[in-house]
Amino acid sequence: MENGDYKDVPENANEHCPGTQSESAGKSDACKGCPNQEACATAPKGPDPDLVTIVERMATVKHKILVLSGKGGVGKSTFSAQLSYALAAMDFQVGLLDIDICGPSIPKMLGLEGQEIHQSNLGWSPVYVESNLGVMSIGFMLPNPDEAVIWRGPRKNGLIKQFLKDVYWGELDFLVIDAPPGTSDEHISIVQFLQATGIDGAIVVTTPQQVSLIDVRKEVSFCKKVGLKVLGVVENMSGLCQPLSEFRFMRTTETGEQKDMTEWILSYMKGKAPEMLDVVAYTEIFDSSAGGAGRMCSEMGIPFLGKVPLDPQLCKAAEEGRSCFSDEKCRVSAPALKMIIDKLLAQQMISRIEDGA
């Protein structure tokens, strides 16, 4: 299905569908019972004067990258945060926009909890981690971080539009957009709002098992239907991987109790086999016997960017709101992330050359 067809009539629409851009989309008698009814009713329609403002705002942003996932809990926001940290460390001007309205975790992962948005005569000002890394999230607008955001589609769409037209980013090399999991209102809105500004594409994050990949295939299908280029897929949590010296060792007694043997084991290795202390241990957590993300990408004809192991040190960096590249603690995950980011940047450079930019 071509992109233009998608914007007019979805392939699973009812007969006599008025089209997604019609004023009666989602409201006419023909829409009753259609699986797209709510999305069509809440999506922007017809000429929107705010789109002109959004185009003007985004004119100073060179690259716009969406980070998506089919399934929640696969580490999408962690990847978005570390991608932004890495790009900023390369001296790029970076913005990170969190459009996960109901579950904004970016403020914590960037160490910005408790910060507030400020306004100037130029618009809303992002909250800055560094002078070249700004962040915007609904998390900065909640008086109580434990408060649930219970919003319907139109209000979510309205805030996303406000982020795009009212936030003053200044000159940016990259705007990374962290989206919620799935293919719902937020995804339709962000693509429609940014379509005229030129989106580089989407990075899709998954874990290796089929339970996640089933939904990722739907995410890729969504991207194809709306004309959004898939820049590549990242397989996150691709096996637990950490130095042997960082493990805890337990022994189960005859009574079923767990006895901590860590100190004895480490002392034994230090005395008898010190070279083992530098060995990195690996074990598969999720079943990847079906080939994981790499095989799915091969079957679907989309780029596979690489694997990131499940690294407890990376999890700790996210909890503490810091970059995994700032020290040597994330020694198994940081190199994997860097290879993926380098591949992404090389891909972007090739695209620019091909486009004559």
Image (spheres, helix red, strand yellow):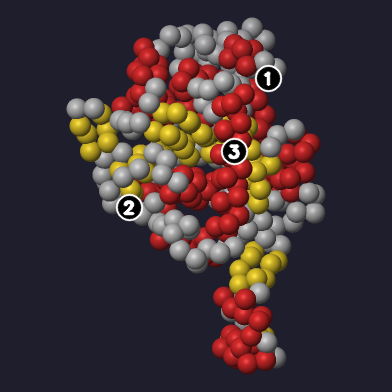
- Tell me if mark 3 has few (under 14), some (14-19) or many (20+) residues whose alpha carbon lies within 10 angstroms of its own: few
Q: How far apart are marks 3 and 1 (CA)?
A: 37 Å
Q: Do the residues labelled 3 and 1 touch (CB within 8 Å)?
A: no
**Is 334 placed above or below 212 here?**
below
Above or below, comparing residue 32 to residue 242 in the picture: above
In the picture, residue 295 is in which quadrant? top right
Q: Which mark is residue 346?
A: 3
The reply to whether the C-beta atoms of the residues labelled 2 and 3 are less than 8 Å apart is no
The answer for how far apart the CA atoms under marks 2 and 3 are is 33 Å
**Residue type beneath disc 1:** Asn
The residue carrying mark 2 is 113
Q: What is the CA distance from the residue labelled 1 to the residue labelled 2?
A: 42 Å
Residue 298's disc is none
Question: Residue 152 appears at what percent x and percent y?
Answer: 43, 30
Three-letter residue code for mark 2? Glu
Q: Which amino acid does label 3 sit on?
A: Ala
Q: Dot 2 lies on which element?
A: loop
Write down the residue under mark 1: 12
Residue at the image point whose x is 78% and y is 49% from the top: 291
2 or 3: tag closer to the N-terminus = 2
